[in-house]
Amino acid sequence: MSLAKKLRKLLESGVHRIGELEIQTDASNNHFVLSHHLDTSRAAQPTFGGLVHHAGPTDAREISTYAEDGSYRFTKGQVNLKRGWVMTLENEEALRRALDQFYPACVGLFIAWQNGDLEIENLRDKLARQTGMYRFARTISDAGAQKLVQAVCGPAHQCAKKILWQLNPVTPLDDSEASRFNGIPGMVPESEAIPLLCREACNHFVAECRKAAKAEFEATAKSP
Amino acid sequence: MSLAPKPNTALLIVGHGSTENPDSSTPYFEHADEIRSRGLFAEVHCCFWKEEPSMREAAYMIDAEEVYVVPDFISEGYFTQEVIPREFELSGPTTQLRGKTFHYCLPVGVHSSMTGLILRRAKEIAPDIDPALTTLIITGHGTGLNQNSTKAIRDQVEHIIASGAGYAAVIDAYMEEQPFIADWDKLSQTPNVVIVPFFISDGLHSYQDIPVLIGIENEVGAAASQRGVFRHNPHHVRGKTLYYSSAIGTERLLADVILDQVYDFDHVHKKL
């Protein structure tokens, strides 16, 4: 069964949320209506309550690239998706394309996770394969990496993904808001949402590891 | 030559992407849209080094069991020979992995059909000038770390000279190695100069850095999509008439070069 068909099954089972997006199914024509979850009631009105209408998935990238304040949303797990728009999608394949733009690969990652097929990579494995300028990131201490998770990840730092990885097979992340977050922004039961999953540290996190590792090295070099 | 439809196959375009410049990944999505509109593949996706989805996430959004991976990169080098194979866990031209077959194609920038795109772009931005009075400069990043990074540009220079396009001179120049693009006026003996940046996107380097190096901007400005006013050719600087094009990768027809690389892969590795 294709991912799009599996997505439809999820919606039929009661799922209606992914990230900050609300997915409504139009029972009259089986189309899908996508909007920011805070615009759900307007999107359900006959003329979309004045929301700017986009037909088809093409504009999903444009909508998701900038936050309301004009800042670049370089990771899509950020919880600052623009409001004021609605997108209509004529079938589950178009919906999947749109979702892959708003939250890249997140539908597929969730389905693989449900099936037990998602390969999770711990931080040390991710850092160990870095080359070039990022090679130095692997020298970060465990304590430094734990601290960084709490400083970089989680909804408080604009990332609403559920972290699945550990430092290494025997070292889980320290308990924190970031490590505890379930990948579902907004007040929605877990059975009604596709969580945003983080199967390995992103390159932004790796870049931050490099900076922290350098700071650790310099601090050690300066100490008597 | 044209690529026969592959209705059970996915095309995965790999780009660099950026955490700082949103324009960096625009061409990849445009190339994907263009190819998707032709209906040649069951699926067309993009993935990135610096943006999402990552290369390791990409397989999770693909239904097809056979996937052509095309680096939408300008040269062979660190990314295409080290990073991309490592991230996809590729072991050769064709790799079987987790129930899928990945075919790893050459990067777009090394394909011979890039020559036509460069000439087309040069003609578009300076349609009325006499090539005999014009130097065509193809510019890239350049790095002392990898000789391959400039080879694609040097090859294009040779192809254009051999094509008989009629330019008084065709030369290569770089941001970070000699000959430096900052010296474009000293490198050219003609009154007209056309510079085509051999980059995929109008990102930091081609849109913001090089214009300062060549003297058409005083300081690094905003990203292309954040500017209200677009630059207009020609620029009269350093006693010459200068035409500066957008990055070659922003040419929508680069989609054809992606397809050319898939076609070539089939003929080299599948003997089709």
Image (spheres, coloured by chain):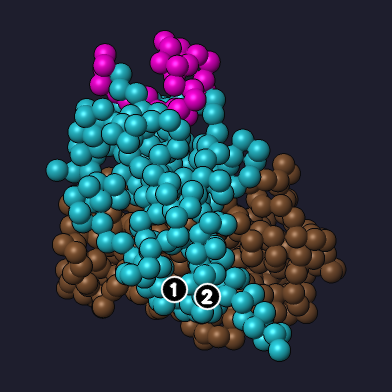
Chain colours: A cyan, B brown
Q: Farthest top residue? A: A46
Mark 2 falls on what kind of element?
loop
Q: Nearer the viewer, residue A8 or A16?
A: A16
Q: Residues within 10 Å of mark 2 (few under 14, many from 20)?
A: many
Q: Name the residue nearer the viewer: A200 or B155.
A: A200
Marks 2/1: CA distance?
Answer: 9 Å
Between residue A36 and residue B94, name the one nearer to us: A36
Name which quarter of the figure residue A30 lies in.
Answer: top left
Q: Is residue A118 left or right of residue A22?
A: left
**Residue lying farthest right?**
B239
Quadrant in which the N terminus of chain B is drawn: bottom left
Q: Nearer the viewer, residue A141 or B267?
A: A141
Q: Which mark is residue A127?
A: 1
In the rendered image, the quadrant that contains the C terminus of chain B is: bottom left
User: What residue is rendered at 34% in x and 65% in y?
Assistant: A121
- Residue range of the region highlighted in magenta in the rendering: A27-54
- Does residue B1 show up? no
Query: Does B271 appear in magenta?
Result: no
Residue B182: x and y in percent read 74, 74
Q: What residue is rendered at 31% in x and 31% in y?
A: A192
According to the image, label 2 marks what residue? A140
Looking at the picture, how far across and down is residue A31, in whole percent? Answer: 29, 23
> Label 1 neighbourhood size at 10 Å, few (<14), some (14-19), many (20+)?
many
The residue type indicated by label 2 comes to Ile
| Residue A208 in picture, x, y percent from top left | 57, 65
- Examine the rendering and report whether any part of residue B186 can be seen: yes
Based on the picture, tell me whether residue A35 belongs to the magenta stretch.
yes
- The residue shown at (70%, 66%) is B210
- Chain for disc number 2: A
Mark 1: which amino acid? Answer: Leu
Circle nearer the viewer, 2 or 1:
2
Q: Are marks 2 and 1 in contact (CB under 8 Å)?
A: yes
